[in-house]
Amino acid sequence: MADSLPDPVRAPLQALLAGVEAVRGDRAVEDALLSRHRGLLPEKAAVIALGKAAEAMVRGAVRAAEKIGFEKVGDPPFSSLFVVTRHGHLSADFPAAMGQRFSQVQCHEGGHPLPDVDSLAAGAALLEWCAALPPQQPVLVLLSGGASAVVEALHDPVTLTQWRALNDWLLGSGWPIEQMNRVRAQFSRIKGGGLARALGRRPITALVISDIPSDDFMLVGSGPLSPLPAPAPETWQQLPRPFCDMPLIEAPKPSAIPLYCVADNRRAREAAAAEMNGEAVVLDTPLIGDVERVAQRLLAVPQPVIAGGEPTVRLPDQPGRGGRAQHLALRMAQAIAGTESVFIALGTDGNDGPTPHAGAWVDGKTWARAEQAGLDPAGALAQADSGRVLAALGQTIDTGPTGTNVMDLFYFSPAAR
């Protein structure tokens, strides 16, 4: 991929990929358990790993256990393992490899960004697995973004069809992830502290890779270990029927469980900037909110910058192909047309929305190329169809699953003024 990129794009993209590498799940968990959180890993723990980075996080915990000395000949260092990740994010050799380190292994894949029947099957299996654990069994929970969709157990009378429709509505609403996750927790037997309640009094240690713009990483995965405040009534009233007519639930609060954040967007930004050797500064605050507002904030910076965050896109009734990173990239292409500017947007999990692409790069020539090719970039922005245009131009970025999920990374180099 790097050989076909223009020179102004190649080094910044490699820097963003270095940022992703720095927060990979296996590295983050291993480093945490061997250094700043040394002593947290219980021997013979049962392990629950949920989210897009589940496999990588488990591998990191296994490596840490080996280095600590938990592994003995003929004696697995852990009890049982339960994993749920996104379809396509589980390696073929993973279950067999983990069978040598755990006494029992269950691996599931579920839908994302919309939950599917496999998500519900995984949720039912998870609750059954928790109930079967010995009463004093120590549990290590490894949590990352994507858990809101890939594993679910719904309160009656909500059906899967209704639940998919609500999640589709939420994803197109332009609401921030914190607001969406508080709504999701209301209808779930796993979210909003539901997993903690299912585990009862068993001792729990939890490590989190955060995809939340704020520091409130209890909201990752819609808070399976954390009681979440109910949404505000004005938020609830905006939901489509039948959800807005359902009563708000004040869920029973589980005991406080300490959560340790082992990777986030800030660490990825800093690693990417370090790779640039001072040629770009780090934008300290995450870029969140409407994609147009995010674009304007980027366009106002006077020098090359590494940034991160999670813009929101309000989707039309029949959206096209793309994700928030690709949408932002095409909007930036429009704004920098005819200049020497360069912009890159990269989803750190390897999937930008419901597409196989991680993101895209654009420069001052992108918009004109799209118009000359008859791709109608302005229409694509209006219809949330940016992925079609950028793929046709050969300007999408493909990484495959990365083993992490800390929102998006951005690079912007404005033209000399």
Image (cartoon, rainbow, N blue to C red):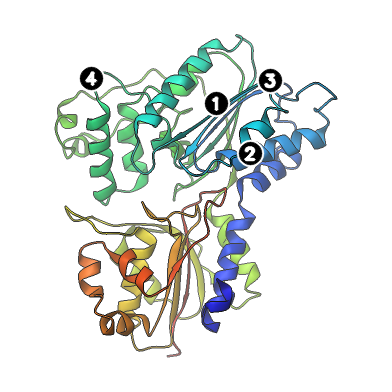
* Quarter that holds the C terminus: bottom left
Q: Nearer the viewer, residue 74 or 147?
A: 74
| Relative side of 401 to 231, left or right | right
User: Which kind of residue does numbered mark 3 sit on?
Assistant: Ser
Would residue 68 be found to the left or right of residue 230 on screen?
A: right
Q: Distance between the residues labelled 2 and 3?
A: 17 Å
Coordinates of residue 353 in the picture (x, y in percent): 37, 53
Note whether 104 is above or below 326 in the view shown.
above
Which residue was labeled with disc 3? 103
> How many numbered discs sit on the rendered protein?
4
> Which mark is drawn over residue 157?
4
User: Which is in the foreground here, disc 4 or disc 2?
Assistant: 2
CA gap between label 3 and label 4 equals 36 Å
Q: Nearer the viewer, residue 100 or 32?
A: 100
> Does residue 52 lie above or below 162 as drawn?
below
Tell me if mark 2 has few (under 14), some (14-19) or many (20+) residues whose alpha carbon lies within 10 angstroms of its own.
Answer: few
Q: Which residue is label 2 attached to?
A: 93
In the picture of the structure, the residue carrying the numbered disc 1 is 257
Residue 92 or 361: which is nearer the viewer? 92
Q: What element carries label 4?
A: loop
Alpha carbon separation for disc pair 1 and 4:
29 Å
Q: Distance between the residues labelled 3 and 1?
A: 26 Å
Q: Which secondary structure lies at badge 2?
A: loop
Residue 155 located left or right of residue 211: left
* Residue type of the residue flagged with mark 2: Asp
Of the residues under marks 3 and 1, which one precedes in the sequence?
A: 3
Residue 335 position in % (x across, y down): 31, 79
Helix, strand or loop status at disc 1? loop
Q: Is mark 3 on a helix, strand or loop?
A: loop
Q: Which mark lies nearer to you, 2 or 3?
A: 2
* Pick the front one: 181 or 348: 348
